[in-house]
Image: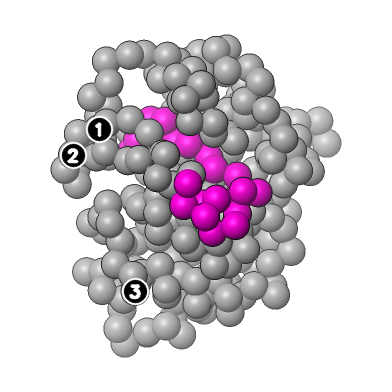
Amino acid sequence: MLGKFAKIFKTPKPVIAMVHFGALPGAPLYDAEAGLEGLLQGVRKDLKSLQDAGVDAVMFGNENDRPYEFKVDAASTATMAFIIGQVRNEIRIPFGVNVLWDPMATVALAAATGASFAREIFTGAHASDMGLWLPDAGAAMRYRDRLGRKDLALMYNISAEFAHSLDQRSLPDRARSAVFSSIPDAILVSGVITGEAAALSDLEAVKRVVPDVPVLANTGVKHATVADVLSISDGCVVGSSLKVDGNTWNAVDPERAKDFMDKARKARGG
């Protein structure tokens, strides 16, 4: 089942780096004075820093739109599409999208921008900070196909941040079931909150039961742990560790990003 994953990521064990948007129009933290130009400048700067550092892919996300929503306002998705469109000719590597926490908006944004992959919580039932969380993988996948994007790789985050699974099955059993019933292109394993690591034992356990599906660490990968993570997983998503002072809400630190990629390349053999 490496099909789409292998076609998108030419490097084994890819590092997917986050380009975090500033808060979007309508969100409580939106900076109306800086406006769309401020959002664009922030995205453009982080994108350049990450590409210069040699990351394998980037993913655009709206982490600053706190508190998060299950059905995102159309203005949020439209703004993300506009900003990505402005920098589209500057993107030199594969890119993906994630509109927290709305699978349908994520798929729509991917279709509108030509993204190669999308990340979301597509399965499960969760008690969360935002209330009862009941995503619908079937609707999202059918929507993807209706939009003519069967090629879009869907990455299933099976351990939702900011939430507790109401499913009493073990994490490996949930992963195995998701692969059987929902056909993900990759499985992502997360910590309990943005910037906090998934347990290596969880990564190992999930990879053991779905050996033919790419399994990635989704949160909390650090300079000191990237070698251990990549020894187990098929890649990682990283955001906070590449920021100034390792703070999720800061801009990307070019030197931290370069150092992280040096360690990642060494860990995967050059």
Q: Secondary structure at mark 3?
A: helix
When asked about the image quadrant of residue 96, the answer is bottom right
For the residue marked with disc 1, what is the amino acid? His
- Dot 3 or dot 1, earlier in sequence: 3
Report if the CB atoms under discs 3 and 1 are less than 8 Å apart: no
**First along the sequence among labels 2 and 3:** 3
| Residue at 34% over, 61% down | 64
167 w.r.t. 234: above or below: above
Residue under circle 2? 132
User: Residue shown at 18%/39% (left/top)?
Assistant: 132
In the rendered image, the residue lying farthest to the left is: 131
Q: Residue furthest right?
A: 270
Q: Nearer the viewer, residue 31 or 177?
A: 177
Label 3 sits on residue: 75
Q: Amino acid at mark 2?
A: Leu
Q: In the rendered view, tell whether residue 1 sits above or below residue 68.
A: above
Asked whether residue 29 appears in the rendered view, the answer is: no
